[in-house]
Image: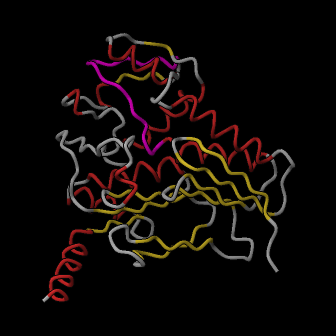
């Protein structure tokens, strides 16, 4: 016998959102969760007019500004934490148009929600926005009495509330984006979020996808990699998977060693080489 679920599907943050709620929770729980995600989309998008595009205009012009959007303010505070936790490798201000610019060039006063930049730059929240949106949706669901739910933003950002409806952790198999039917790792989540970042696969060819920049030197990441990060916070998970993707070997090792069962980095160039060798042998 299946377990009944209430489901909400819609498009936001440039991807397909799915909310699955099981068991307890008020009738308007899904509505509240959807509104939470859409409010993040409205605040953080750079693809249409938003509080973030307004902020970017001011930062590019060299002006300081007091932020009056609470969602954007909360996101900036969360990013400040993520920047520190990722050894400065997650940097939404890194942009090849402004060589050398980064989060370190921002001055952000939490008490007044005022932000300024010491040099021209702009913010692009990227995948962090999806994790941050899932965090806010989970908070809305919990406030509505939900104790069991699974939320996804595309195929690379997932958050769960509580245990699986059948008990135990929510099981997920992370596919190898470079090899059909292959699995990189299997994990179980309980009250956690998961983020996958990769430089290969169909999703990397989307026209709106920005190049992955190394904050250390401004170069574009071209190595065939896939990373997985799990954290209580969806925003932190997104930041960490991005950081691992751009990290040099020493910093990648530090980040992986800090949470070995919750952070993973895969070199897919080796898998690609093995596939090419197999194809050549078959042709011969």
| Looking at the image, residue 18 lies above or below residue 101 | below
What secondary structure do most residues of the magenta stretch adopt?
A: loop
Asked whether 35 or 273 is in front, the reply is: 273
Membership of 32 in magenta stretch: no
Q: Name, please, the residue furthest toward the right.
A: 27
| Looking at the image, residue 58 lies above or below residue 179 | above
Q: Residue at position x 20%, y 85% from top?
A: 278
Q: Residue at position x 30%, y 23% from top?
A: 121
Asked whether 271 or 146 is in front, the reply is: 271
Question: What is the quadrant of the N terminus in the image?
Answer: bottom right
Membership of 123 in magenta stretch: yes
| Looking at the image, residue 149 lies above or below residue 184 | above
Residue 139 placement (x, y as % from top left): 69, 46
Asked whether 127 or 179 is in front, the reply is: 179
Q: Is residue 142 left or right of residue 194?
A: right
Question: What is the quadrant of the C terminus in the image?
Answer: bottom left
Residue 222 placement (x, y as % from top left): 21, 54
Q: What range of the chain is rendered magenta?
A: 112-128
Residue 201 placement (x, y as % from top left): 35, 61
What is the image's colouring?
A: secondary structure
Q: Name, please, the residue furthest toward the front.
A: 283
In which quadrant of the rendered view does residue 25 lie?
A: bottom right
| Looking at the image, residue 272 lies above or below residue 92 | below
Residue 264 placement (x, y as % from top left): 37, 67
Q: Residue at position x 37%, y 43% from top?
A: 207
Q: How many marks?
A: 0
């Amino acid at each position: 016998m299946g377990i009944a679920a209430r489901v909400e599907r819609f498009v936001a943050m440039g991807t397909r959102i799915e909310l699955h709620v099981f068991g307890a929770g008020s009738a308007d729980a899904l509505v509240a969760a959807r509104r939470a995600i859409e409010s993040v989309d409205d605040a953080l998008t750079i693809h249409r007019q938003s509080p973030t595009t307004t902020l970017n205009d001011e930062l590019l012009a060299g002006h300081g500004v007091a932020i009056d959007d609470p969602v954007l303010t909360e996101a900036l505070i969360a990013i400040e934490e993520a920047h520190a936790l990722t050894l400065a490798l997650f940097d939404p201000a890194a942009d090849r148009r402004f060589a050398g610019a980064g989060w370190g060039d921002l001055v952000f006063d939490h008490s007044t929600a005022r932000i300024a930049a010491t040099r021209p730059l702009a913010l692009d929240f990227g995948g962090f926005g999806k994790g941050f949106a899932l965090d806010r949706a989970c908070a809305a669901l919990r406030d509505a009495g939900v104790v069991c739910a699974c939320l996804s933003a595309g195929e690379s950002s997932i958050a769960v509330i509580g245990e699986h409806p059948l008990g135990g952790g929510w099981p997920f198999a992370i596919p190898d984006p470079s090899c059909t039917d292959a699995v990189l790792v299997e994990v179980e989540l309980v009250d956690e979020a998961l983020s996958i970042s990769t430089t290969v696969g169909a999703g990397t060819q989307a026209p709106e996808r920005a190049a992955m920049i190394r904050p250390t030197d401004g170069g574009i990441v071209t190595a065939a990699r896939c990373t997985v990060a799990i954290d209580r916070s969806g925003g932190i998970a997104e930041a960490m998977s991005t950081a691992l993707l751009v990290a040099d070997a020493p910093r990648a090792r530090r980040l992986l060693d800090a949470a070995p069962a919750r952070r993973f980095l895969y070199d897919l160039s080796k898998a690609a080489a093995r596939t090419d060798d197999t194809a050549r042998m078959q042709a011969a």
